[in-house]
Amino acid sequence: MNIKKLLIGSSCVLAAFAVQAQGFPERTVNLSVPYGPGGSTDGISRKFAKLLEDELKQPVVVLNQPGASGTLQLGNLSRAKPDGYTIGFYSYSAVTFTSQLMKVPYKKDDFDLLGGVAEFSYGIVTYPDSPINSIKDLVAQSKTSKGVFYGVTGAPNNFPFLQLQKLTGGQFDQVTYKSSAESINAVMSKQVDVALQGPSEYAELVRAGKLKFISSASDFRLPWFPNTPTIKEQGYDIGIRGIIGIAAPKGLPKDVKAKLEAAVHKVASSKEYNDFLVNQYGIKGYPASATEFSKLIDNGFSVMRNMIDTYNIKM
């Protein structure tokens, strides 16, 4: 009798999950973001949410959760109920790099990854009358008594300079700013020689002749500056990856996970979303499947561990 009740109870639970998955979603889905309103991450999340609404036929609300170098939002996401109604942006650097430098409230296995969304772009700018016009010029100045002062907001923006210093023996001195805007202003006022940030921070200033763009620091030429080569094209095997995707708390029902994966991939692959990324922020899409995105994250841990150990990076 007890066994019969147990079987009946188990059947009811499985039936409940089947009904939940079949009807998903029946209400608003929350999309958490690790930074505040107004920045590029917030901007691409709001466009993504709007397009995801069209796929899921339910509202998708963006929740800004800034703090702790992007790890506060991931901690909250890892503790959410795994029912598909709470998903979030999932940053390559916060997971593979920051988590190895500081104590974080989550583990890699606390998430179900749903797919890739975008790849951020990075580039190096200097002031208009600077003698630095290329990476060759940058390295040449680093070997003079003047050296090179570079402005960044921290890792991974400082990676190329740390690598150049090790590869060339030049002198590269870091000046850390609280915001990307501050680092750009520091270049314009000649407090530092160069800065490395995303193109939306300086594109208009470059077009207005108030700054000079000397190199992409990504593995590809920036969409807004297609004629300017990458660091790799200028002779040094260096480049930053800034991938962001979508994740959910571990334990999603199988059918719910499959539906979210399909919707995320459709939005990330759409021409409308990819055109938006290029036109509004000068970055490109990264419509990776959940499997492809998971592989990238898994490989990223060893890549970032090597960076941390090689360059003695500390938070």
Image (cartoon, rainbow, N blue to C red):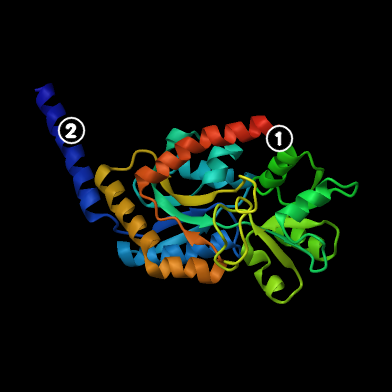
Q: Position of residue 160 (x, y in %)?
A: 67, 46
Q: Residue at x 43, y 66 (%)?
A: 273
**310 over 48 or under it: above or below:** above
Find residue 10 and name its label: 2
| 77 sits to left or right of 191 | left
SS at circle 2: helix
Residue 243 is at least partly visible in this image? yes
Considering depth in this image, is 274 or 267 the residue closer to the camera?
Answer: 274
Q: Which residue is drawn at 82% across and 61% down?
A: 131
SS at circle 1: loop
Find residue 314 and name its label: 1
Q: Position of residue 69 (x, y in %)?
A: 63, 46
**181 over 136 or under it: above or below:** below
Q: Position of residue 109 (x, y in %)?
A: 43, 34
> What distance separates the C-alpha of mark 2 from that of mark 1?
50 Å
The N terminus appears in which quarter of the rendering?
top left
**287 over 165 or under it: above or below:** below
Q: Which residue is drawn at 83% across and 56% down?
A: 192
| 175 sits to left or right of 162 | right
